[in-house]
Amino acid sequence: MSKKLLVAYFSASGTTAGVAKNLAQAAGADLYEIKPEVPYTKADLNWMDKKSRSSVEMNDKSSRPALADQDAGIIDYDTILLCFPIWWYVAPTIINSFLESYDFSGKKIVLFATSGGSGFGKTVDGLKGSVAADTMIVEGKLLNGNSSAADLKKWLETVL
C-alpha cells in the first residue's frame, strides 16, 4: 500500500527550508511551508535578547503564533514529515499552532529538525498535547548539512 506523504516545514531563516525540500524530493512527498502570519525578522530571532519575539514565545509554553494560512490539506495524507529548527531544545511554538490547527487523528508524524548543536530533547513530549491521542509522533532525525537523496531515501525506508 502506497502512503501519501507530506513534508510540512517551518523555516525562519531558510536553513530548514533547504533540508525540507531535499527530504520531500527524496521521499516523493508533497511540500507545505508553515508560515507565520507575521514573518520573523533577524531581530525577532536573536536568542540572546530576552525580549526578542522568539525568546518571548519560547519562554511562554502557551504561546501560539498565528499562522498565515491553514491550507495544508492534512486530511489527504497518511504520514506527515514535520521539519523545523530546534529552538531552546524543543520545537518552536508555531509548530504547536500548526498541530492544533488540523485533525491528525490516526496519522503518523515523523519529526525532522535542524539544530545548531542540541538534539531533540523533550520535543516529542512537548508536541503530543497538541494532537489527538491516536496520533503517532516519532522522533526522526536531525538533518544538519547536506544529506544526499540516496542517504535520505535509505533512512526514510526505516521510519516509514
Image: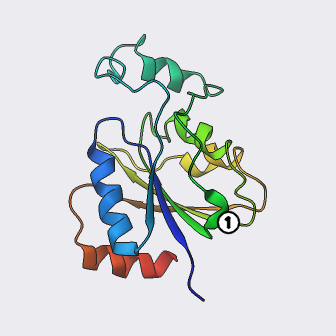
- The structure residue drawn at horizontal position 33% and vertical position 73%, both measured from the top left corner, is 26
The residue at the far right in this view is 133
Label 1: which secondary element: loop
Which residue position holds label 1? 107
Quarter where residue 107 is shown: bottom right
The amino acid beneath tag 1 is Lys
Q: Is residue 15 above or below residue 21?
A: above
Q: Nearer the viewer, residue 39 or 123?
A: 39
- The structure residue drawn at horizontal position 38% and vertical position 25%, both measured from the top left corner, is 40
Residue 13 seen in this snapshot: yes
The residue at the far bottom in this view is 1
Residue 143 seen in this snapshot: no
Tell me residue 61's x, y (percent).
62, 28
Tell whether 121 sits left or right of 104: left
Q: Is residue 62 above or below residue 99?
A: above
The residue at the far top in this view is 51
- The structure residue drawn at horizontal position 66% and vertical position 26%, both measured from the top left corner, is 62
Q: Nearer the viewer, residue 142 or 31?
A: 31
Q: Is residue 117 above or below residue 57?
A: below
Q: Judge the density around disc 1: few (<14), some (14-19), many (≥20) Cα neighbours within 10 Å.
A: some
- The structure residue drawn at horizontal position 54% and vertical position 41%, both measured from the top left corner, is 95
Q: Is residue 37 above or below residue 148?
A: above
Tell me residue 136's x, y (percent).
67, 64
Quarter where residue 73 is shown: bottom right
Tell me residue 28's x, y (percent).
40, 74
Q: Quadrant of the N terminus?
A: bottom right
